[in-house]
Amino acid sequence: MKQNLYNLGRCLIALYFLLPGIMKFAAWDQHIAMMEEHGMPMASILLPLAGLIQIGAAILIIVDRYTAIMAIVLAAMVVLINLNLHDFWNYSGIVQAHETQNFVKNLGILAGLLILAGYRWEPLSKSKISHA
């Protein structure tokens, strides 16, 4: 049962990044506009980079390869996204409520990624990340 729950959770959290990673390319203009609205510099460079990281890391997590490392990479990305794109402290009213909800939701995703990384981490002295 533990392995089944792990596999299901791992694949679900990976899908959370895979689908938005694909959408970054499918809805390019919408994502560029959102990034620019939040004052993100170099949006046309950061957007494809974010999309490729999300897609690549999600695929590796789905196949359970380098899971801990990819979870840490995505966790760092969540922190950056939260601080730059869900900056609820810069808004008021319904926009603030929406951005606060996204910020807190992402904290839950961050927690899941950290748990996933911790569950799969092996000491570096073993010179590999477990994917058994």
Image (spheres, rainbow, N blue to C red):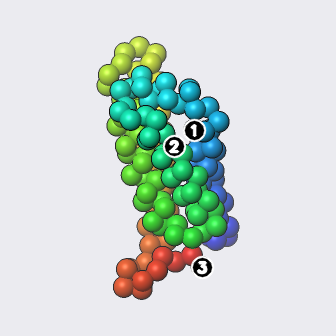
Q: Earlier in the sequence, mark 2 or mark 3?
A: 2
Label 1 sits on residue: 24
The answer to whether residue 30 is above or below residue 80 is above
Label 2 sits on residue: 48
In front: 63, or 109? 63
Residue 49, horizontal then vertical, whole percent: 48, 47
Q: Do the residues under discs 1 and 2 have CB atoms within 8 angstroms?
A: yes
- Crowding around mark 3 (Cα neighbors within 10 Å: few <14, some 14 to 19, many 20+) is few
User: In this view, which residue lies farthest toward the left?
Assistant: 89
Q: Residue at x 64, y 67 (%)?
A: 63
Left or right: residue 114 compared with residue 48:
left
Residue 117, horizontal then vertical, whole percent: 46, 64
Q: Residue at x 53, y 30 (%)?
A: 31
Tell me how far mark 2 sits from mark 3, CA to CA. 31 Å
Tell me how far mark 1 sits from mark 3, CA to CA. 32 Å
Residue 40, horizontal then vertical, whole percent: 37, 31
Q: Three-letter amino acid code at disc 1?
A: Lys
In front: 24, or 73? 24
Where on the picture, by quarter, is residue 20?
top right
Q: Three-letter amino acid code at disc 3?
A: Ala
Q: Any mark on residue 126, and which?
A: none
Instruction: Name the element at disc 2.
Output: helix
Left or right: residue 77 compared with residue 62:
left
Residue 123, horizontal then vertical, whole percent: 38, 80
- The label nearer to you, 2 versus 3, is 2
Q: Residue at x 43, y 34 (%)?
A: 43
Label 3 sits on residue: 132
The answer to whether residue 8 is above or below residue 17 is below
